[in-house]
Amino acid sequence: WLDVTQCYSYRKAIITFFSLTIHRHESLILGPQDELEYWKKRGARFSQIVNQVNSSEVQMTILCVKLSHSKIMKEWKETDKKITFCYNEAKDNAKFIQALETKCHSLYLDDPVNMKKSILGLLQTVRLIHSVSQFYNTSERTSALMVKITNQMIETCKDYITCRGQESIWSQDRASIKEKLTQCIMLNKVYRKTYSIVKNQPFVSGQQPFNFSENYVFGKFDAFCRRLSKIIAMFDLIDDYTGLFQKRMEGLLLGDALEEAVQRFTEIKSIVMNKPYDYLDQRNTEYESDFKSFLALTDELKDGIAETIERNFDSVWETPQGIQFLTRFEKVSEKIPLARMDEKYDRILRYCEKEVDRIIKMYKKQKDDPPVPHMFPPIAG
């Protein structure tokens, strides 16, 4: 009897161990393929337990316990039900996720541009699983599956942006990297839009609605895209100033003032350029801090450049050359916060009006007896 009890206790310990594996710790980057592998492994483990339970040794032990009318028999029946339930659950879930696997190939193999085409079929399959699966018919469990899809989209976007880890955001052509970042942002928009379409499609009466916490499912992707948008804004700002400095601020900033501004901008760029951290990790708070400092210092530089230009050219608007500078100021004012351009137009207009009045008065005064230019004969008048 002691051997029988020990045998049963041993079996129960194994069963309890496997039963508790359902409460697994999940990585933040797990994808749908990991979900499939989990259920395959879980199904294989419970298949082994079922085979052990059905072995002649264990069946004989159970028969002995039953004939002895032991209280353990009641516990065994409950445990046996759990074994059967967990085994069938793992087998069914593996089957459902297997059906999802073909729809997930695009998440692993395609770039964000081509991935958009497969999102509708993927989410429709998830909705079907949600409606027929006994395990995935709850909002929480299907949301967890959707999060894995989101995770894989983000990982694929990172591979796409970095050429599978071979390049950084700084080592690539600027137009190319900005296009990649934009395509990843567009993928998130298509993902959300497609989810809304699938969610609002008619469903059979009695089925659970396909509706989840959008912040839980899409929040990570949204945060990732906000990071990409900041990187694009950073690139645009750097490119804008680089172009303006190459043109010497359209000729409005010269000499020491130009050199000092270029040197200061180079120092400001170093705050965000070529740092050792992962720029694409939306959880990285170092970049957030550096980006804020970059914007603040750039604003200071802009104000300083604007003040210098305004001071150096303040008197030009009361001269004939003022009109020639308007176009230059218009171009620079698109990036640098110069004073209101309409005020400059007003000053030029007032100057022109004064000149016209002066010329009219001079004409009236001299029209009957115009002055003869120096060294001209009297008849020239």
Image: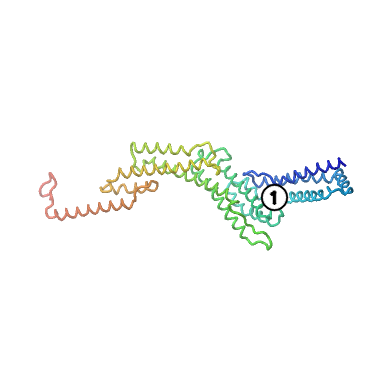
Extreme-right residue of the structure: 67
Dot 1 crowding, Cα within 10 Å, few <14, some 14–19, many 20+: many
Name the foreground residue: 35 vs 322. Answer: 35
Image spot of residue 60 (x, y percent): 88, 45
Extreme-left residue of the structure: 378
Image spot of residue 266 (x, y percent): 42, 37
Image-based side of 246 in relation to 23, left or right? left
Q: Amino acid at mark 1?
A: Ile
Report the residue at 64% width, 43% height from top: 27
Image-based side of 328 in relation to 141, left or right? left
Image-based side of 74 in relation to 266, left or right? right
Image spot of residue 118 (x, y percent): 62, 52
Extreme-front residue of the structure: 71
Image spot of residue 106 (x, y percent): 63, 48
- Element marked by disc 1: helix
Q: Which residue is mark 1?
A: 97
Extreme-bottom residue of the structure: 205
Report the residue at 20% width, 54% height from top: 357
Image-based side of 238 in relation to 221, left or right? left
Report the residue at 81% width, 42% height from top: 9
